[in-house]
Amino acid sequence: AQSVTQLDSHVSVSEGTPVLLRCNYSSSYSPSLFWYVQHPNKGLQLLLKYTSAATLVKGINGFEAEFKKSETSFHLTKPSAHMSDAAEYFCVVSDSGIQFYFGTGTSLTVIP
Amino acid sequence: DSGVTQTPKHLITATGQRVTLRCSPRSGDLSVYWYQQSLDQGLQFLIQYYNGEERAKGNILERFSAQQFPDLHSELNLSSLELGDSALYFCASSIAGQNTGELFFGEGSRLTVL
């Protein structure tokens, strides 16, 4: 069975400081993992995805995530937060691109 | 622009009424997913269609139904509407079946039930 746990429902950082959004997954198969971002009143946009290639995945807007199989984690990071990063972030796991399992989301606040 | 089109963007209606939300997937995508997002329930998976056939069901109420047509567009029908049905309804599409495929989301249809 597939599932995703986002360990923090809210994260608050100061502008210019690092961002860490944590995600743990459970999967019976070799999973595909995704991070999506949702700005207020907008649809979800793909930030990055892992599909069994390089374990360190680079995405848009300076975000990256590292797949750690031993820890079943796929944490999202960014070296320096920008005000425009304030949004809701969803970690997603998929078994063969057929069904997708969403985490409950992490709300990121960036303090000026 | 994700390539997924949802209409209408906003809809206001009364309790007891029925509405239809429409989704056109990205060109070439065979699978359509419907999600409901509300403040108290978060993002909830409703139903998935693949090439016209229902593939998976999530937390979809019996008052709700969906279908995918031969041209691959999909409609979500919500009937006997209640105040609690007020939410943002998202459609997403994917190629499906490819383990590298991701979901592409539309901008959503915001339903307000008064």
Image: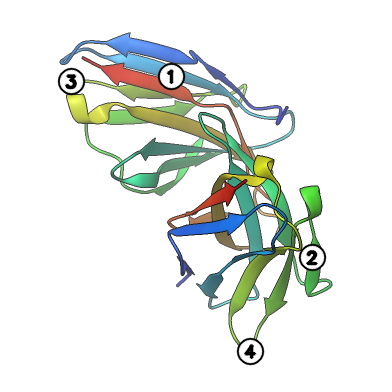
Q: Nearer the viewer, residue A70 or A84?
A: A84
Q: Local crowd at mark 3 within 10 Å, few (<14), some, or many (≥20)?
A: few
Q: Which residue is mark 3?
A: B80
Q: Which residue is mark 1?
A: B21
Q: Which residue is mark 2?
A: A57
Asked whether the beta carbons under mark 1 and mark 2 sit within 8 Å of each other, the answer is no
Residue farthest bottom in this picture: A70
Residue drawn at point x = 38 percent, y = 12 percent: B11
Please indicate whether residue A1 sits to the left or right of residue A78 in the image. Answer: left
Q: CA distance from mark 1 to mark 4?
A: 43 Å
Q: Which residue is mark 4?
A: A70
Q: CA distance from mark 1 to mark 3?
A: 15 Å
Expressed as whole percent of the image width and height from the top left, the position of residue B45 reads: 41, 46
Quarter of the picture containing the C terminus of chain B is top left
Circle 2 chain: A
Q: Nearer the viewer, residue B40 or B105?
A: B40
Q: Is residue B100 visible?
A: no
Residue drawn at point x = 59 percent, y = 29 percent: B106
